[in-house]
């Protein structure tokens, strides 16, 4: 089985700021969310967990799996999408004239700029992870957990479910929500 979870809340989530690859830690609410998820999902079996190397995802995985003998392995390909110079900007100031606004309103028309990552690049790196790491583990019958970020998770969920880029955000999950994909 393949499971995906988004990290717990951070102060930037609360402030409606784009985080991207900026390494923001969980806040106290995010830690409580992860602890609640630990209780809620305690009966779900995981053989291995891969997570983003960013603090918020790593800490979520550590809290979620505390007390279990489940290895947690960070992989750079699972980091959040890089939003370049727009990281730290409040969502409300992005629309409608901000150049990165189309990443959220019309992902199929989005053109990356100002150091931001393209969707093609995001799909390439998460696809590489799925092909080289997740695929072989799933074929062995392993129960795999990925703990990551909203955009990165959407890229994996969307690819597996065949969601077109224009509907990218339909795969969005809430903080500490566990989704069974396969």
Image (cartoon, grey):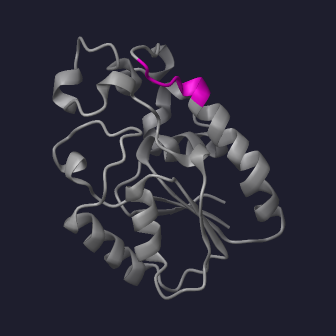
Q: Reply yes or no: does residue 166 show up in magenta.
A: no
| Residue at 20% from the left image edge and 41% from the top image edge | 16
Which x, y percent locates residue 40?
40, 80
Q: Is residue 50 left or right of residue 24?
A: right
Is residue 32 shown above or below 161? below
Q: Quadrant of the N terminus?
A: bottom right
The tally of labels here is 0
> Which image quarter: residue 3?
bottom right
Which x, y percent locates residue 180?
57, 63
| Residue at 60% from the left image edge and 52% from the top image edge | 75
Specify the segment rendered in magenta: 115-121
Q: Quadrant of the C terminus?
A: bottom right
Q: Reply yes or no: does residue 117 show up in magenta.
A: yes
> Which image quarter: residue 74?
bottom right
Is residue 93 shown above or below 76? above
| Residue at 29% from the left image edge and 70% from the top image edge | 31
Which x, y percent locates residue 22?
36, 41
| Residue at 40% from the left image edge and 52% from the top image edge | 173
Which x, y percent locates residue 175?
34, 58
Is residue 112 shown above or below 117? above
């Amino acid at each position: 089985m393949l499971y995906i979870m988004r990290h717990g809340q951070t102060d930037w989530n609360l402030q409606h700021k784009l985080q991207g690859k900026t390494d923001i830690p969980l806040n106290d609410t995010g830690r409580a969310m992860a602890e609640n998820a630990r209780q809620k999902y305690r009966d779900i079996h995981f053989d291995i967990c891969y997570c983003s190397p960013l603090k918020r995802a790593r800490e979520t995985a550590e809290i979620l799996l505390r007390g279990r003998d489940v290895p947690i392995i960070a992989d750079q390909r699972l980091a959040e999408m890089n939003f370049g110079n727009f990281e730290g900007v409040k969502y409300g100031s992005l629309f409608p004239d901000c150049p990165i606004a189309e990443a959220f309103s019309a992902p199929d028309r989005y053109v990356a700029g100002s150091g931001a990552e393209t969707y093609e690049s995001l799909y390439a790196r998460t696809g590489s992870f799925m092909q080289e790491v997740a695929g072989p583990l799933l074929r062995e019958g392993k129960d795999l957990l990925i703990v990551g970020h909203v955009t990165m998770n959407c890229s994996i969920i969307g690819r597996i479910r065949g969601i077109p880029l224009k509907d990218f955000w339909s795969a969005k999950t809430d903080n500490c929500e566990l989704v069974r994909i396969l």
